[in-house]
Amino acid sequence: MLKNLRVSLVLLLICGVAYPLAMTGIAQIVMPAKADGSLITDASGKVIGSELIGQSFKDPKYFTGRVSSIEYNGAGSGSGNYAPSNPAMIERTQKDLAAFLAANPSVKQEDIPADLLTNSGSGLDPHISPQAAKIQVPRIAAVRGIDAAKLNALIDEYTEGRSLGLFGEPRVNVLKLNMALDQLK
């Protein structure tokens, strides 16, 4: 029994303390920005978000991201995991659809990309599809008085390709796009 306890304690120290500390130390040396959470700072150096966690943008002069059932709370992740037929899911989607259409009156319902009305699995996804960004251009162009062609070029500039050229879909980080939007004249 004492032998089992010692083995458990040694494994706890190796796997629960030494290994995590070693990996964190190596990550801090090899890729410090990613090890610290891929933080995004403004020109003054103030942290305004993470490249990995979405944010809520309610102001009509900004691009909006995906729906988040956890309000982009990075302390946890998750989704409601409702079936498409679930009454709560239908009600939430109809409410979000109505709000999007009210904010974007030039958009037809059938043209709205699904990623603007659906949660990601984690509820933290900071990305939307390029189509989801471009469908918001008329609203932002009108509110900010910026030419739509300039906004579309900005979206193209901030569109990230597939991971390793093979995985996933092209995507746009909403926080980075909105930061660049604020820099436009």
Image: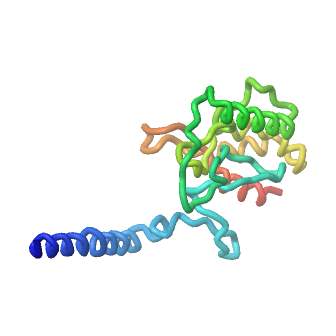
Q: Position of residue 46 (x, y in %)?
A: 67, 74
For residue 183, above or below residue 44: above
82 or 36, nearer to the observer: 82
Residue 1 falls in image quadrant = bottom left
Residue extending farthest to the front is 1
Q: Is residue 147 left or right of residue 81?
A: right
Residue extending farthest to the top is 110
Q: Residue at x 85, y 44 (%)?
A: 141
Q: Residue at x 38, y 74 (%)?
A: 29
Q: How is the image coloured?
A: rainbow
Q: Is residue 12 left or right of residue 82?
A: left
92 or 38, nearer to the observer: 92
Count of residue discs: 0
Q: Residue at x 54, y 49 (%)?
A: 78
Residue 140 falls in image quadrant = top right
Q: Position of residue 52 (x, y in %)?
A: 55, 56
For residue 98, above or below residue 171: above
Q: Is residue 94 left or right of residue 126?
A: right
Q: Residue at x 70, y 76 (%)?
A: 44
Q: Position of residue 13 (x, y in %)?
A: 25, 75
121 or 171, nearer to the observer: 121
For residue 81, above or below residue 10: above
Q: Quadrant of the C terminus?
A: bottom right
For residue 8, above or below residue 132: below
Q: Position of residue 4 (x, y in %)?
A: 12, 70
